[in-house]
Every structure is written in C-alpha cells, then in structure tokens.
Image (cartoon, helix red, strand yellow):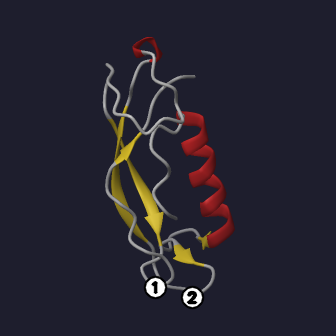
Amino acid sequence: MNTPKPHIRYHELEDAVGQHVQKHFQWEEDEPWSCKKCGRELRFADCVIHPCVKEHGRKPESNEPCSGGGPVRRFALPYCPECEVVPKDIVHTCAFD
C-alpha cells in the first residue's frame, strides 16, 4: 500500500488501510500475517498522523502545510516487502470530520 495522500480524513485512512489488508493479506490464528500473492510475511511501516484543525481555513484537498492541535497518532501500515514499495514513514492528515 502506498502512503495515503496528505490531509486525508481519519475515516478515509482507516477505510483505505482496511480495504488493502482484506484484499492483499491473509492471516491464520497463531501465524504471522502474509501476502496472498507471494506468501511472504508482512512488514509494518511506522506512520504518524499529525491532526490539523478546520478553523485554520485550509481545505482538506490542498497540499499547503497546515497546523493544529491534539495528540499525534501512530499506527503500523502493513506492506509486503516482496510485492510492494516500502511506504513512507510519515502520513500527514487533517481531522476535518
């Protein structure tokens, strides 16, 4: 999975990751996650979500830098080291929802 676009909404990011996982990966109880295509064990990229605020007037689809408050969130973005490019390690997102 490629790193999602900048300024993606939280629910869009969760949906995109969930769809990618269901489509491309498999897991069994007590077994590591693996790629459906090649069978290789997955790796996880450490991603950081920087929340932004709507009051600053920047539109979500803009590539302009934004600012905001709230806690920074971290999550593991799964990827297959054989079939996918290593995702970028930072995701900037805006909480406009």
Q: Quadrant of residue 37?
A: bottom right
CA neighbours of label 2 inside 10 A, class few (<14), some (14 to 19), many (20+):
few
Q: Dot 1 corresponds to which residue?
A: 82
Residue 11 position in % (x across, y down): 59, 36
Q: Dot 2 corresponds to which residue?
A: 38
Residue 24 position in % (x across, y down): 63, 71
> The C terminus appears in which quarter of the rendering?
top right
Residue 85 position in % (x across, y down): 43, 74
Residue 86 position in % (x across, y down): 38, 71
Q: Please say if 49 is above or below 20.
A: above
| Total labels drawn | 2
Identify the residue at horizontal 56%, vertical 78% (top origin): 35
Residue type, numbered disc 1: Glu
Q: Please say if 1 is above or below 12.
A: below
Q: For the residues marked 2 and 1, what is the alpha-carbon distance in whole angstroms?
A: 8 Å
Which of 6/29 is in front? 6
Q: Quadrant of residue 55?
A: top left
Q: Earlier in the sequence, mark 2 or mark 1?
A: 2
Label 1 element class: loop
